[in-house]
């Protein structure tokens, strides 16, 4: 409770409110301090008081052989994941709790979520209300069932103070391509910082998977906790409904999008060591799409092709999982390949369709990255070399 | 204390941005990659990115590599909680100071600051 009150002071809240659920990001091992903190809670007999899901940890508890790092770190990581479960949280170990049918808070519901992509999705796509709860405060809110009434918990803070509009030179084909969304997310994060922005100029009714990719990238390059996509997210039926009157309008043109796409690629060449997909965790629809893109072909024997997903999604994937594995795809749960030593080798070029993976992997695991669409990634995995398709971007 | 200022031109997510074992800035997208944050008064416009930064700050305090203070242009809940937890666990506080933009921008890299 001291932490929750401290949070109220920092955010300027006048009072605390009840939350109906929590998503706890603190179960990823970042050193002994993370274990010291949960041990303090365990020693005090703390229990979560609201339904609580857990974010990814340091290793895949169902397939621990996929961890290729220091055995002692793996053991500490496993212990941390277990300690958080012992507080009464559900062992979901996923960064996409919103893909679980019974963990989707309703429009307007007050919750306390950690994990930057989940926070952005919760506010933007579900229309539920959370602030950016980082490690420690997420579990503090889960235990107390309370959160400071400030920021995005309040209606007045949820309107956009910035409008970003796709310029006329962005071709229609790109506006409706999956690969636009992670790239647009990186741009959004840089433009918006921590502000709520409304994106105008996209076709209505964008899928949850595209909005997930957009939010995850925006929360990597910026502190984006909420965005609106006019015609697609629940609090933005129209631009006027989503924005604060008089907010500035900025244009995003094709050149900037192309430049960010190129920047996400740190390796130039055809060599390919691995392909990593599913950041944030792949939905069932994405697993089905990867299987469809493979179309009966197999991953090249010299390439490691990895898809990260949630353990509950994997359990529901059945035949699709079997098809992917038969094609040589490895399925990883409970963790992710850019936060832990999972890839058998991380010293060569790795291709990804995730803006978030491309953004963090060079610093975290030292990977050289080729960013591309899902089609480019699967095509390259099969070919055993980087195969690009620049058509949707106009001239390369 | 009188740490020297390390002025970052862009916000930094400590998670993915600082190695708590060494204090080094490791974000490849950040213009000041390779700088070391240990013992410095880190000045930046805002925190950024991952919600795991609180853990990285607490771990850096435990490991003795943390910044001496962090000076920001706007409040940052994640860094403030990391500092509060480090205090609860280890009795060491990293002051998180919010300054008006003009005062923040007046600080030059290497300035000796008096943080109380």
Image: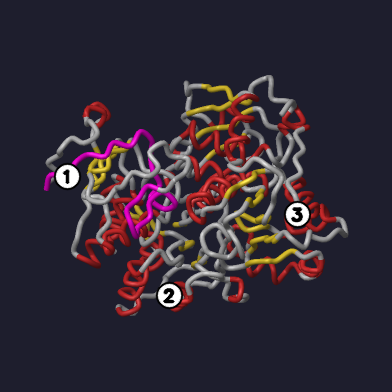
Q: Which mark is residue A381?
A: 3
Say if labels 3 and 1 share a chain. no
Q: Characterize the local packing of mark 1: few (<14), some (14-19) or many (20 or more) Cα atoms within 10 angstroms.
A: some
Residue A215: % across, % down: 56, 44
Query: Going 29% across and 44% down the picture, which residue do you hit?
Result: A12
Q: Chain of mark 2?
A: A
Total numbered badges shown on the rendered structure: 3
Quarter occupied by residue A195 = top left
> Is B71 included in the stretch rendered in magenta?
no
Quadrant in which residue A156 is drawn:
top left
Task: Please identify the dominant SS of the magenta region.
Answer: loop
Image quarter in which the C terminus of chain A is found: top right
Identify the residue under disc 2.
A76
Q: CA distance from mark 2 to mark 3?
A: 33 Å
Q: Residue A83: where, in percent of width, then height?
A: 42, 76
Judged from the image, the secondary structure of the residue bearing numbered disc 3 is: helix
Residue A13 in view here: no
Task: Tell me where residue A193 appears, x and y as whole percent.
Answer: 44, 36
> Which residue is labeled 1 in the image?
B3
Q: Earlier in the sequence, mark 2 or mark 3?
A: 2
Task: Please give the range of residues in magenta.
Answer: B1-25
């Amino acid at each position: 409770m001291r932490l929750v009150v401290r949070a109220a002071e920092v955010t300027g809240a006048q009072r605390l409110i009840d939350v109906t659920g929590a998503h706890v990001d603190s179960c990823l091992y970042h050193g002994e301090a993370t274990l010291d903190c949960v041990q303090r809670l365990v020693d005090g007999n703390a229990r979560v008081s609201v339904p609580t899901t857990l974010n990814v940890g340091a290793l895949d508890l169902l397939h621990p052989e996929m961890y290729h790092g220091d055995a002692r770190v793996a053991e500490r990581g496993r212990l941390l994941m277990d300690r958080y479960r012992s507080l009464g949280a559900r062992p979901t170990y996923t960064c996409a709790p919103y893909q679980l049918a019974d963990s989707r808070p309703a429009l307007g519901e007050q919750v306390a979520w950690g994990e930057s992509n989940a926070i952005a999705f919760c506010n933007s796509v579900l229309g539920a209300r959370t602030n950016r709860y980082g490690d420690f405060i997420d579990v503090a809110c889960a235990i107390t069932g309370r959160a400071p009434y400030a920021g995005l918990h309040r209606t007045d803070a949820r309107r956009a103070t910035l409008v970003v509009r796709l310029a006329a030179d962005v071709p229609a084909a790109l506006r409706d391509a999956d690969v636009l969304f992670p790239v647009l997310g990186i741009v959004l994060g840089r433009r918006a910082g921590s502000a709520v922005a409304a994106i105008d100029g996209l076709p209505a009714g964008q899928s949850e998977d595209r909005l997930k990719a957009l939010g995850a990238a925006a929360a990597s390059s910026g502190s984006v906790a909420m965005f609106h996509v006019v015609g697609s997210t629940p609090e933005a039926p129209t631009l006027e409904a989503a924005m604060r009157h008089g907010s500035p309008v900025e244009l995003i043109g094709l050149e900037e999008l192309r430049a960010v796409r190129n920047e996400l690629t740190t390796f130039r060449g055809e060599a390919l060591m691995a392909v990593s997909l599913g950041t944030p965790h792949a939905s069932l629809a994405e697993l089905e799409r990867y299987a469809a893109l493979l179309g009966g072909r197999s991953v090249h024997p010299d390439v490691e092709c990895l898809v990260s997903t949630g353990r509950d999604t994997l359990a529901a994937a059945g035949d699709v999982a079997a098809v992917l594995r038969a094609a040589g795809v490895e399925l990883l749960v409970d963790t992710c390949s850019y936060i832990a030593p999972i890839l058998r080798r991380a010293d060569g070029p790795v291709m990804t369709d995730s803006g978030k993976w491309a953004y963090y992997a060079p610093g975290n695991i030292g990977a050289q990255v080729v960013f591309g669409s899902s089609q480019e990634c699967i095509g390259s995995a099969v070919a055993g070399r980087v195969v690009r398709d620049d058509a949707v971007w106009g001239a390369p | 204390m009188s740490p020297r200022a390390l002025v970052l031109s862009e916000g930094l997510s400590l998670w993915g941005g600082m190695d708590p074992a060494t204090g080094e800035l490791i974000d490849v997208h950040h213009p000041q990659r390779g700088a070391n944050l240990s013992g410095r008064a880190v000045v930046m416009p805002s925190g950024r990115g991952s919600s795991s930064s609180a853990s990285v700050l607490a771990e850096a305090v435990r490991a003795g590599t943390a910044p001496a203070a962090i000076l920001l242009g706007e409040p940052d809940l994640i860094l403030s909680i990391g500092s509060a937890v480090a205090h609860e666990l280890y009795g060491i506080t990293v002051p998180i100071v919010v300054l008006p933009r003009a005062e923040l921008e007046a600080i030059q890299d290497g300035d000796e600051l008096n943080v109380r």
